[in-house]
Amino acid sequence: MTPAKAGVPTIAEASRQIASKKLSPVELLEGCLARVERLQPKLHAFITLTAERAREEARAAERAIMKGGPKSPLRGIPLGLKDIIDTAGLLTTSQSRHLIDNVPAEDAAVAARFRDAGSVLVGKLATHEFAFGGPSFDLPWPPARNPWNPEHFTGGSSSGTAAAVASGMVLGGLGSDTGGSIRAPAALCGITGLKPTYGRVSRRGVFPLAFSLDHVGPMAWTAEDCAILLLALAGHDPRDPASADVPVDNYTARLNEPIRGVRIGVVRHWFEKDNKAEDQTVRAIDVALAVLKDLGAIVREVILSPLADWFAAGMIILLSEGYSVHERWFKSSPERYGESFRDRLAMGALLSAADYLPALRRRRELADEMAAAFTEVDILVSAAQPGEAAPIREVPKWSLFEAPSFAMPFNVSGAPAMSVCCGFGAKGLPLALQLAARPFDEATLLRVAHAYERVTGWRKARPPD
C-alpha cells in the first residue's frame, strides 16, 4: 500500500481542476498513458489501447473548454470500456476467439453517452470471456492481474476495468454485472463499483450474458466518481426493451447531505452463516457499521431467505439464458471458446423449462421479500467478497459454484448495489462491504457510500507501481 499517487486525481478532482483551467486534459491523459506504458505489461488490463485517438479527443476537449467551458464534468476525463461494449470502428472482442476480428459499426448506448459527455476513451479493457469464464490462460489475451499484487486475482468479470482504475491507468470506466461482475472485481481491487437498478442504464450494444440479469454500471475510485459517471449513463433508451422510463435523479446534488436517520439493515447471516466470510472481513464490516452509526445512521439486523436460495434461482436463470445466447456457437465451434467459459456455460444445455420456470417463480418471491425489507430499511449491508483476493493461479474452474454469491441477490431482485473498500487484510489486499438500496434509489446508496468514504482513510492509498 502506498500513498495516493501524485497525478492520479479522482474524476471529481480532475473535473474541478479542468473547469478552473488548473489542469489540462492533455496533461491528464499523458499521465494515464505513462502509467499504461509502465503497468500494462504486468497487469494486462487492456485488450485494445487507443492512445492516438485519446490524444485527439483530449486536444478537442481542451479546445472546447478554452472556448466555452467544460459543459460536462466528464469533459476531458480519461475512461475505459469493458471489451463487451460495442465501439464503432474499434475492435470489440469479448475476450473470445469467436469475436477476435469483430469491429462494430455502431457505438453501444453507454459508449455514445460517454462520448457525448466529452470523455476521452483510453481503450477497451479486459474481461473474462463473454463476461463469465475466467481467469483463462488459454485465450489470445492473458487475464488481467490485481494491481495490489499481480500474482493475485482481480475478480471477474470486469477485471480489466478494476485493474485499470485501481492503478490509475484510467480514472473510471464501465463494467457489466450479471451475478457480481462489477462488485467482485471492485472489491478485490479496492475500488468502488456500482450495479445500478435493472433498467436504469441501457444495455444496447453490450454483448449479453443473461438478458434478465444483465446490468451495466460505473467503476471508479470513489462513490462520488461513480455518481458523476452514473449521471451521464442513466436514462431511458427506447431501443433497449429492458430500459426503464423512470426519471433520473441528480446523483451528485445530495451527496454531501448528512446520513443521520438513514435506516441500515445488516443481512448478517449471509456472511456469518450462509457463506462464512473470513474473520478479518467480518471485523472490517463491523467497524464500517460503527462508522455509519457514528454518522447518525440507524443500524439493525435483517433476516432474508438463505443466500443459497438467491444463488440457485439466479444461477439457473443465468445458465439457461446464457446458453440460449451461445447455443449456435456451442454446436458449431465449441473449440473456439476457452475451457473455463465453455465448461461452465455448457451446464445450461442440461437445463430445461422445468428448471427455468420454477427459478423465475422463486425469483419473483425473493424479489417481493426484498421489497418488503426495504419498507423497513433504506440500505441493506452484507459482505462483497469473503476475503482478500486469491492467488490467480489457484482459482478453480468451478469457483463460481463452490459457495453462494453475496452479489447474486441484487441481480435476482434488480435492486442497486455497490462494493466499497473497507480496509485491507493480512496480505495487504483490499477488503470490501456491499451496500444496496431499493430500486431507483441510487441517490441514497451513493450518499451513504460517500459519507463512509469521506470519514475513513481507505481512499488515500493506491497500489504500488
Image (cartoon, rainbow, N blue to C red):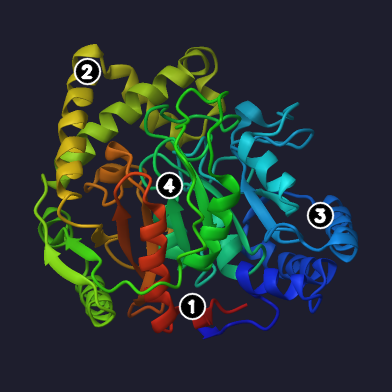
Q: Residues within 10 Å of mark 4 (few under 14, many from 20)?
A: many
Q: On the rendered image, what quadrant is the C terminus found in?
A: bottom right
* Distance CA(mark 4)–CA(mark 1): 22 Å
Residue 234 or residue 380, whichever sits in front = 234
Q: Earlier in the sequence, mark 2 or mark 3?
A: 3
Residue on which the image places disc 3: 54
Q: Earlier in the sequence, mark 4 or mark 2?
A: 4
User: Which residue lies at the image location 22% right of the left edge and 78% below the top edge?
Assistant: 293
Label 1 SS: helix
* Distance CA(mark 4)–CA(mark 2): 25 Å
* Distance CA(mark 4)–CA(mark 3): 27 Å
Question: Whole-percent x and y of residue 429?
Answer: 41, 74
Tag nearer the camera, 4 or 1: 4
Residue 294, located in which quarter of the rendered image?
Answer: bottom left
Residue on which the image places disc 2: 357
* Distance CA(mark 2)–CA(mark 3): 46 Å
Mark 4–mark 1 CB contact (< 8 Å): no
Question: Whole-percent x and y of residue 408?
Answer: 29, 44
Residue on which the image places disc 4: 196
The reply, left or right, for residue 397 in relation to residue 159 is: left
Q: Earlier in the sequence, mark 4 or mark 1?
A: 4
User: Which residue lies at the image location 25% right of the left edge and 66% below the top edge?
Assistant: 262
Q: Residues within 10 Å of mark 3 (few under 14, many from 20)?
A: many
Residue on which the image places disc 1: 459
Q: Residues within 10 Å of mark 2 (few under 14, many from 20)?
A: some
Hey, what amino acid is under mark 2?
Leu
